Amino acid sequence: MIDLKLLRDNPDLVRASQEARGESAAKVDTLLAADVARREAVARFEALRAEQKQLGKQMPKASGDEKAALLARTRTLADDVKAASAAVTAAEDALKAAQLAIPNVIEEGAPAGGEDDYVVLREVGEHPTLDRVRDHLELGEALRAIDMERGAKVSGSRFYFLTGVGAMLQLGLFNLAMQQAVEYGFIPMIPPVLVKPEVMQGTGFLGEHASEVYRLEADDLYLVGTSEVPLAGYHSGEILDDLAEPRRYAGWSSCFRREAGSHGKDTRGIIRVHQFDKIEMFSYCRPEQAHDEHLRLLAWEEELLAKVEIPYRVIDVAAGDLGSSAARKFDCEAWVPSQNRYREVTSTSNCTSYQARRLNIRYRDEKGTQPVATLNGTLATPRWIVPILENHQQPDGSVRVPKALQAFVGTDVLKPR
């Protein structure tokens, strides 16, 4: 949730952020009013409690009519205090609801607009010249690497098996990614993929993305769509004493997404599926470090893309496509020859202190305690297999294995079987 001090000091900044996202600026006024109402309710309650304590001190010294008057006032005051306490609770609930309704304030420089208003920052690598372009599924089936038919038989649409060299390709990519993450000081993590509602809510995935989330109603638990969720919850309710440098984790987990609203989109192959593995980078740092840490996460994503020799571009995602928690987001999109366009394979977001305020994660310095900043970035998913197969395909239907993956996969060329 956003910083109330920022709201009070600079409401126009929050309004401008809302407008850049295409959201209602009126929600800012609702939050301002809720903030004032809560402070007034607290002030009234505290004044009545102070009077109540003062009467308690006077009572032993009083007698006669004075004592009778004090007793009468005490009885009235007890009812007033009870009502004032209820008013504080109601005002706090209204404030929280109004605060949760406003997404993170965007970072200066983030493009305004919706999904199509991104800014291309750079394009890297040469597109392959191919006389015949086979898509990843045709290549994967010929290599016996991807089995969509049996995935659908076992689990339904948008499920698949990675088999043989397909499984080896994913394991190789993920091991390469985790190896790189560890080299840069990330602590490797294999987190739980079922989380409590307060953790899912705290990371911002039960708002506009709630329809994407699988819920186990009998257990009141949620299946995560990214290990960002358990990694964000890892330090919930904690104070991090030593945060001179960012604290970084790399989570390898299975992820689950309902893909609600995507009917008819990317139904062929493994681009948009319900279950997939992912390595996610996650960083806790001081707010003043967050901008530079964000650029580092992006650089590490680009480094891995270079290792697997994929042409890609980097885009600065527009405000209306950020999601509620992100103040800024950069995507890396790989070139997909069969579609003659770029498709997202990584995303990195600076969530500033938005998630930390919800999850009560703070750090301690000479000034006391204050919320940390959290950032996340995708390092590898099975979707990478799509551009790897398509960009490295050969005329005979074989696929050249990028040099960085050859030791993991056990060969330099994948051949149709």
Image: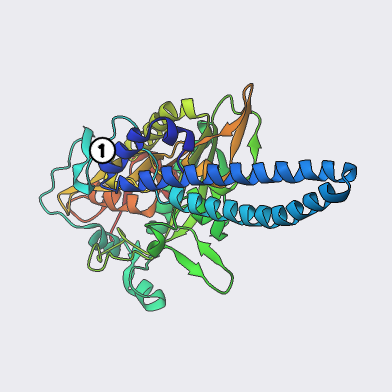
**Residue at horizontal 51 percent and vertical 56 percent from the top:** 200
Instruction: Say which residue appears at 25% left-offset and 54% top-offset.
Output: 398
The answer to which of 284 and 399 lies nearer the viewer is 284
Please indicate whether residue 352 sits to the left or right of residue 332 in the image.
Answer: right
Q: Is residue 109 above or below residue 273?
A: above
**In the depicted view, which residue is nearer to us: 274 or 312?**
274
- Does dot 1 land on a helix, a strand or a loop? strand
Question: Going 89% across and 47% down the picture, which residue do you hit?
Answer: 63
Which residue extends farthest left?
131
- Residue under numbered circle 1: 315
| 76 with respect to 205 (left or right) | right
- Quadrant in the picture for the C terminus: bottom left
Display coloring: rainbow
Within-10-Å neighbours for mark 1: few <14, some 14–19, many 20+: some
Relative to residue 160, is residue 55 drawn left or right?
right
Tell which of 5 and 63 is nearer to you.
63
Residue 325 lies in what quarter of the image? top left
Along the viewing direction, whichever of 72 and 152 lies nearer the viewer: 72
Residue 258 appears in the rendering? yes
Within the image, what quadrant is residue 361 found in? Answer: top right
Farthest-out residue, top: 366
Q: Is residue 154 above or below residue 416?
A: below
The amino acid at mark 1 is Ile
Which x, y percent locates residue 71? 80, 53
Total marks drawn? Answer: 1
Residue 390 horizontal/vertical position (percent): 23, 51
